[in-house]
Amino acid sequence: LCVAAARMGEHTAEEMKKGHMEEQRSLQAKLQDQIGKQSSLADEAASYQHFEEDARRSQEQLRALTACVKEAAKVMRDHGPVHLGDLDHAIGQFTLEMRRQGEMIPPITRLSHSSHLVANHLTVFCELSSSGQLCVRTKAGLVPMLDFLKQHGYAKKAATKPIPSKGTHVAAVAPKSAPHPAAQPKPKL
């Protein structure tokens, strides 16, 4: 009886040992799973923190820009309309006159008081000559704007007829050297 009880106790102890080992493996697997989840959450938290900092910087920039725009609007409101200076007026008149004459010129955009952008990529310094002519300041001195544009290949005659000035009447007259198109003999086929 004692031997049978000892064998039974041994068998039960062995079963309990196997059960404990099985439970230990299961707990270790769960622990590894939790460690993996925790490191994944740490990566996500770091990524979230990075995006949060970026959003905070963007909001600060937006606040600064908004304040700047408000200040600019206030200054514009307080100082009334902007009046064109002599140089701006000369550039506007030059552009209109060139179009009237059928010249194709690139856009001329003001960058600062005397600095202008020609053809969206060439920065020039414009001035009015002593006679009031629009010029570009070069190393050689003042060059009339039209001459400067032609030298750089920016001024070309348009394929269409020039735009007439205000108050002028343009009559449709055929050139004297060419006969009327209706008088031309038709080519034989």
Image (cartoon, grey):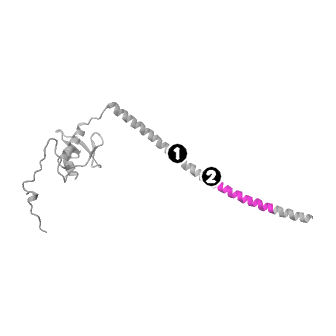
Q: Can you identify the residue that label 2 sits on?
A: 38
Work out how far the residue at label 1 is from the one at label 2, CA to CA, in angstroms.
Answer: 20 Å
Q: Can you identify the residue that label 1 sits on?
A: 52
Residue type, numbered disc 1: Glu
Question: Which residue does the image show at 71% across and 59% down from the upper left?
Answer: 26
State the residue lying farthest toward the top: 78
Number of on-image labels: 2
Q: Quadrant of the N terminus?
A: bottom right
**Neighbourhood count class around disc 2 (C-alpha, 10 Å): few under 14, some 14–19, many 20 upward:** few
Question: Which residue does the image show at 21% across and 41% down from the upper left?
Answer: 93
Stretch of the chain drawn in magenta: 15-35
Q: Is residue 32 magenta?
A: yes
The answer to whether residue 124 is left or right of residue 64 is left
Q: Is residue 83 magenta?
A: no
- Dot 1: what SS? helix
Image spot of residue 189 (x, y percent): 13, 69
**Neighbourhood count class around disc 1 (C-alpha, 10 Å): few under 14, some 14–19, many 20 upward:** few
Where 159 falls versus 7 (above or below)?
A: above
Question: Which residue does the image show at 13% across and 44% down from the upper left?
Answer: 169
Residue type, numbered disc 2: Gln
Image spot of residue 72 (x, y percent): 37, 35
- Dot 2: what SS? helix
Nearer to us in this view, 152 or 83: 83
The answer to whether residue 114 is left or right of residue 16 is left
